[in-house]
Image (tube, rainbow, N blue to C red):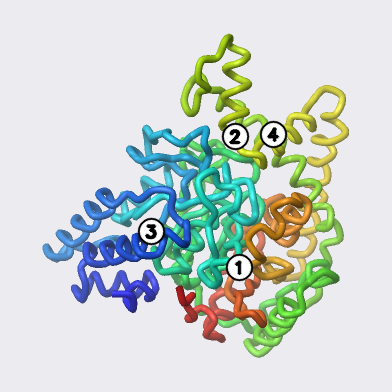
C-alpha cells in the first residue's frame, strides 16, 4: 500500500475510477501510515477517521453503480487546523482554542466535502499561523520528514510534512507571508498561494485579513493545479472574494515556453544565499533556457523593505483579529477570575503562546494613538510601492523566478531564541503577499545534506494558468518531484 500512497493524486484517482483499488482501502492505508509515523513526525493535531471513511464509502458506492465521480474523489487530504470542519476541533494549534469544535464548514472545506475528498485529519501549524518553523504550536513541534532533527518550515508545516511523508496525498494550507511556499520548499513538495480573493477565506481563522490566502499542497504541479480548481470560486460569504469563473488550469500545463520571458529577481539571488540554493537557481535558469524561455534579470528595488512592511501590517491586523479571543464567547477561560478585567487579561495571558503575544503587542503599538501614521499608515504606503515594483516587472516579463528561501531547512531550535533571524526566513516570499499575486514553490534539487531546495515562481494577478505552465515544464524536466522522503 505504501507504493500506492506514493503515487500522485491524479494516479490514485484513476486507480479508484478503474476499480484497481477502493477509496476505503486508500483512506485506511493513509490512516494506518499516520498512526505508524505521526508520533515522531507530529504533523497532525487530530484525526477525522470516521468522516474520512464515510466519504470514501460514498465514493465506492458511486463507482460500483457506474456513476461519474468528481476529480480527486476518494484521495486522502490533510486540512490545516485553522480551517473549520463541522463537528471537529479547530484549534489553530493554540491553547486558547484547544477544545473549540467547529459549528460550520469553511467554504473550502465544503468544496472538499462536495467533491467527496476524504479529510483524514487536522494538520499541525505554528500557533494562529504565526511562525516560519512550526515550532510555535502549543501542542507539539512538527519534524521534517527528510530529517527529523530539522524544521519543516511554517506556518503550514503539518500540512507539508504530511504530504512529503505520504501520510496524505494532498493538503490545504494558508499563506500570509510564505506559510505554504516555505514548508513546500523545506519538505520537497509543491505548494502555492493563489491571487488574493481567488479562494474564499470564509471559515479560515484570520491572522492578517489583507494577506491571508488558502492554497494547495501536492507532490506534483498537476495535482496542485487540479486542487486549486476545486477550492477556488466566488463566495458571497467573503467580501474580498473575486467574482470570476473557475479556470481549467490543467488545459495549459504543457504549453510551449518558447517566447515566454521569465525574470530572475536580482535582489533575491544576492548576498546571503546559501551556495547550494544559488547553484539550484542557476541550474533552473539553464533549464528554462533549454525549454526556449528567455531569461531577463529583473529588479524589485523595494523588496528589501518587505519584511519591515509585513511585520507592521500583519501584526496590526492580528492585533485586531485576535481581540475576539477574550475568554467570554468561546475558547479558553481562566479559572475563578475576580472581575471582568482579570477574566480578559488572564484568559489571554494563559491562552496565547509567546510568539502570538509578541505579535499582538507589536500590532497594538503600531495602531496606537500617536504611532498610527508613523507605522501603520507608512507601511501601507510602502506596500503600494512594493506592489508597483511587481507591476513594473510584469510589464517586461511573463513570470518571475527566485529562490523560495535563501537556505534549506535548519535544525529544530536553531532560530527559536532569535525572532529577527526567524522572520528573515520569509524574505523571498512576503512580497507576493503584499502585492496579492499568485506564487508557488516547486522542488528544484537538494543540498549537500540531502535536504530539498525550492524554486519560487511568481506571476501577475489572476495569471495562475501561466504560472502553473512555467512550473510544470520545469518540473517535468527533472525527477526531483519523484523523490520521496525516506521516513
Q: Earlier in the sequence, mark 2 or mark 4?
A: 2
Which mark's residue is nearer the viewer, 4 or 3?
4
Residue sitting at x 57%, y 56% = 194
Residue sitting at x 57%, y 62% = 152
**Mark 2 to mark 3: distance in Å?**
28 Å
Disc 2: which residue: 352
Which mark's residue is nearer the viewer, 2 or 1?
2
Q: Earlier in the sequence, mark 2 or mark 3?
A: 3
Q: Which mark is residue 168?
A: none
Say what secondary structure mark 2 lies in.
loop
Residue 480 rendering spot, x and y as whole percentages: 54, 81
Q: Is residue 294 left or right of residue 266?
A: left
Residue sitting at x 64%, y 67% = 409
Disc 3: which residue: 77
Q: Quadrant of residue 397?
A: bottom right
Tag 2 near tag 4, CB within 8 Å = yes
Which mark's residue is nearer the viewer, 2 or 3?
2
Disc 1: which residue: 185
Tag 1 near tag 4, CB within 8 Å = no
Say what secondary structure mark 3 lies in.
strand
Q: Earlier in the sequence, mark 1 or mark 4?
A: 1
Q: Which mark is residue 360?
A: 4
Q: Earlier in the sequence, mark 2 or mark 1?
A: 1
Amino acid at each position: 500500500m505504501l507504493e500506492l500512497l506514493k503515487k500522485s493524486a491524479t494516479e490514485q484517482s484513476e486507480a479508484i475510477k478503474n476499480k484497481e483499488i477502493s477509496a476505503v482501502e486508500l483512506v485506511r492505508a493513509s490512516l494506518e501510515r499516520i498512526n505508524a509515523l505521526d508520533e515522531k513526525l507530529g504533523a497532525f493535531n487530530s484525526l477525522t477517521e470516521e468522516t474520512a471513511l464515510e466519504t470514501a464509502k460514498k465514493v465506492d458506492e458511486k463507482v460500483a453503480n457506474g456513476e461519474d465521480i468528481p476529480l480527486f474523489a476518494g484521495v486522502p487530504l490533510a486540512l490545516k487546523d485553522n480551517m473549520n470542519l463541522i463537528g471537529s476541533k479547530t484549534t489553530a494549534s493554540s491553547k486558547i482554542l484547544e477544545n473549540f469544535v467547529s459549528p460550520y464548514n469553511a467554504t473550502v472545506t465544503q468544496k472538499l466535502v462536495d467533491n467527496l475528498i476524504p479529510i483524514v485529519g487536522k494538520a499541525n501549524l505554528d500557533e494562529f499561523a504565526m511562525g516560519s518553523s512550526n515550532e510555535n504550536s502549543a501542542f507539539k513541534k512538527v519534524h521534517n520528514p527528510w530529517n527529523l532533527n530539522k524544521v519543516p518550515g511554517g506556518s503550514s508545516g503539518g500540512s507539508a510534512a504530511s504530504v512529503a511523508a505520504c501520510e496524505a496525498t494532498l493538503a490545504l494550507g494558508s499563506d500570509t507571508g510564505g506559510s505554504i511556499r516555505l514548508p513546500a520548499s523545506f519538505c520537497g513538495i509543491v505548494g502555492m498561494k493563489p491571487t488574493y480573493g481567488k479562494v474564499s477565506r470564509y471559515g479560515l481563522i484570520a491572522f492578517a485579513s489583507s494577506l491571508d490566502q488558502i492554497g494547495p499542497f501536492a507532490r506534483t504541479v498537476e495535482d496542485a493545479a487540479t486542487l486549486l480548481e476545486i477550492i477556488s470560486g466566488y463566495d458571497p460569504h467573503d467580501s474580498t472574494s473575486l467574482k470570476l469563473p473557475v479556470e481549467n488550469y490543467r488545459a495549459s500545463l504543457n504549453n510551449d515556453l518558447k517566447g515566454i520571458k521569465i525574470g530572475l529577481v536580482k535582489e533575491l539571488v544576492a548576498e546571503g544565499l546559501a551556495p547550494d540554493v544559488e547553484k539550484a537557481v542557476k541550474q533552473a535558469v539553464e533549464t528554462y533556457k533549454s525549454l526556449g524561455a528567455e531569461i531577463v534579470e529583473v529588479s524589485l528595488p523595494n523588496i528589501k523593505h518587505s519584511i519591515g512592511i509585513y511585520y507592521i501590517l500583519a501584526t496590526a491586523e492580528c492585533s485586531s483579529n485576535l481581540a475576539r479571543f477574550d475568554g467570554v464567547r468561546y475558547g479558553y477561560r481562566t479559572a475563578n477570575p475576580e472581575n471582568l478585567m482579570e477574566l480578559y487579561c488572564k484568559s489571554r495571558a494563559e491562552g496565547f503562546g509567546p510568539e502570538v503575544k509578541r505579535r499582538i503587542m507589536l500590532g497594538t503599538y503600531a495602531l496606537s494613538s500617536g504611532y498610527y501614521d508613523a507605522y501603520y499608515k507608512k507601511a501601507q504606503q510602502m506596500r503600494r510601492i512594493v506592489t508597483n515594483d511587481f507591476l513594473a516587472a510584469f510589464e517586461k516579463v511573463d513570470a518571475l523566478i527566485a529562490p523560495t528561501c535563501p537556505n534549506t531547512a535548519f535544525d529544530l531550535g536553531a532560530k527559536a531564541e532569535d525572532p529577527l533571524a526567524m522572520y528573515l526566513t520569509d524574505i523571498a516570499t512576503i512580497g507576493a503577499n503584499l502585492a496579492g499575486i499568485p506564487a508557488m514553490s516547486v522542488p528544484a534539487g537538494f543540498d549537500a545534506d540531502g535536504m530539498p531546495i525550492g524554486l519560487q515562481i511568481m506571476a501577475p494577478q489572476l495569471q495562475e494558468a501561466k504560472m502553473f505552465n512555467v512550473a510544470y515544464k520545469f518540473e517535468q524536466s527533472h525527477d526531483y518531484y519523484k523523490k520521496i522522503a525516506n521516513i
